[in-house]
Structures are given as structure tokens and as C-alpha cells.
Amino acid sequence: MYFLRRAPVSLWTTGRDLLLFSLSLCFVCVCVKDKRHDFRKQHLSSMKMSALRLLWVPVLLNLTHAWLCHGACVEVDSDTEAVIGKGFKLGCISCKKRGEVPAFATVDWWFMAKGESEFAHIYSYANISGYITDDRFDDRLAWNGSKKTNDVQDGSIFILNITFNDTGIYRCFFDRTLVFPNYKYRTSSTKFININVVGKATRGMASIFSEIMMYVSIIVLQLWLLVEMVYCYRKIAAAGEGALKDSQSKKSLKPKA
């Protein structure tokens, strides 16, 4: 349900889809090979139609798999480098240990600026509404977490027009109550985020390497898919031609009345 970094997710989703489709083509080739003897008395055109019909089986299975997918809560660390003058998302995700249990939660944010020794309460979210409690963030801070629900798992906020004064440590506090049939269980979670404000955005080597590997993997998977398609098409065509030749040879050898 909650993903702060979508590039790796898109990469694995694309790779999974390509792999499933490649396996589907291999499944078609195996089915054609196993039923070759059953199709020997049919023409080439009927074999191609049968192969195309077999393609629908894995496609429908993949569609069913996609419909049965459900969202999942994933705790991902927040970014820690903000650029002056731009907006910045402070990510704070606290997943329930029991996803099927109904619950309600409140989120509070605290801030300790660089050079200070105590945290100051800056924002509170409860009952599907939030309010700013620190004048330094008036008209600059907005809720960017779970929407239209008291069962909050994403407590992220968004700060507009970042300044150097926003450098410091932010504390995110979740106060959650799990509602069981006969009792309620209260739990809490705290996360600390150290934000550094810079004048210009920088990219780490890990980010650059991940992007390069993403494109390389997509290209390799597409080439693999192309090879699988050509291989399976040739196998189906060869099986159909063999069945057609066998049928014609049997007709020629059949004694005339």
C-alpha cells in the first residue's frame, strides 16, 4: 500500500511480468509437443488456431493472479536530504503487526532544530484531521499520509519552501490502539529522522547504479522474451508442417477403391 521508492518496485514488477509471459510461451510449446500425435490428422491452419487458443490459458491465469493481489504495508526509511526552497516529504510508516485487526491511531511530530537541546511539538493528526502547533511551520506543513481513515499506518508529512532553519532531528510518534472482540490493546512506535538541508540536490552512487541496473535488466528480459517467442513459433510451425506432411502421405498411400 505504501511505497516511497517506486523505481525498484516497477523494475521487479516488469521483470515478473516478462518472466511469466516467457513461461507461458514455454507452456504452449510443451503442450503442442505433447499433443502432436493428436493433431496429425488436422491441417496446418487448425494447429495454429489451437496454439493460439492455448495462449489464453496462461493469460487468464495471470489476470486472475493480478486481481487477487492486495496492498501491503512496507516500512521504508525517509529521505534525509532536503533542498532549500523546495518541498520535502518526511516519511514515517508504522505497519500493524496484525493487518486483519481493526485499529485507530494518532500521529504526532516533534522537531529539534540544529543547536537546540529539546524537541518542540510541531504537528498532530487525529480523527482524520491535523493541525500545526508550531508557528515556524504555519502554511508550510501539510499531511501526506493515510487518507480518510482512522487506521493510520502512513504518518508522513510534507514541508513546503524548505529553509536552512529546518535542519535538525524530527521525531514521529505513533499511538495505536488495536480493537479485538473482547479487549483493546494499545501500542506505540517512535521514529527519528535527521534532516540535512543543502543548496543543491546530489545523487549518490547507489541511486545511479540502481537506475543503470534497472534499464539493463529490462533490456535483457525483453531480449530473452523475443528469443522465447521466436523459438516457440518455430517449434509450433515445425509441428504443424510435420502433421500436414504425415496427413498428405497417408492419403497418397491409401489404396484406391
Image: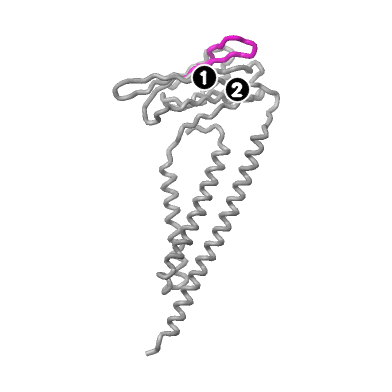
Instruction: Tell me the amino acid under the disc marked 2.
Output: Leu
Instruction: Tell me the amino acid under the disc marked 1.
Output: Cys
| Residue furthest to the right | 199
Q: Is residue 177 above or below residue 9?
A: above
Where does residue 197 sit, x and y in percent of width and height? 66, 21
Residue 245 badge: none
Does residue 232 show up? yes
Horizontal side of residue 51 vs 220, given as left or right: left
Which tag, 1 or 2, sits closer to the chain's start? 2
Q: Is residue 108 magenta?
A: yes
In terms of secondary structure, where does tag 2 sit? loop
Q: Which residue is at a point 52% across and 50% down the rendered structure image?
A: 19
Highlighted range, magenta:
107-123
Where does residue 34 sit, x and y in percent of width and height? 43, 65
Residue 160 badge: 2
Q: Main secondary structure of the magenta part?
A: strand
Near mark 2 (Cα within 10 A), the count class, few <14, some 14-19 or many ≥20, is some
Rendered image quadrant of residue 193: top right
Q: Is residue 4 magenta?
A: no
Q: Is residue 66 above or below residue 33?
A: above
Instruction: Give the distance between the C-alpha atoms of the residues marked 1 and 2, in whole angstroms.
Output: 18 Å
Q: Please tell me whether mark 1 or mark 2 is closer to you in this view.
A: 1
Q: Which residue is at a point 45% across and 68% down the rendered structure image?
A: 47
Where does residue 54 sit, x and y in percent of width and height? 43, 60
Horizontal side of residue 150 vs 157, given as left or right: left
Residue bearing the label numbered 1:
172
Where does residue 68 sit, x and y in percent of width and height? 41, 43
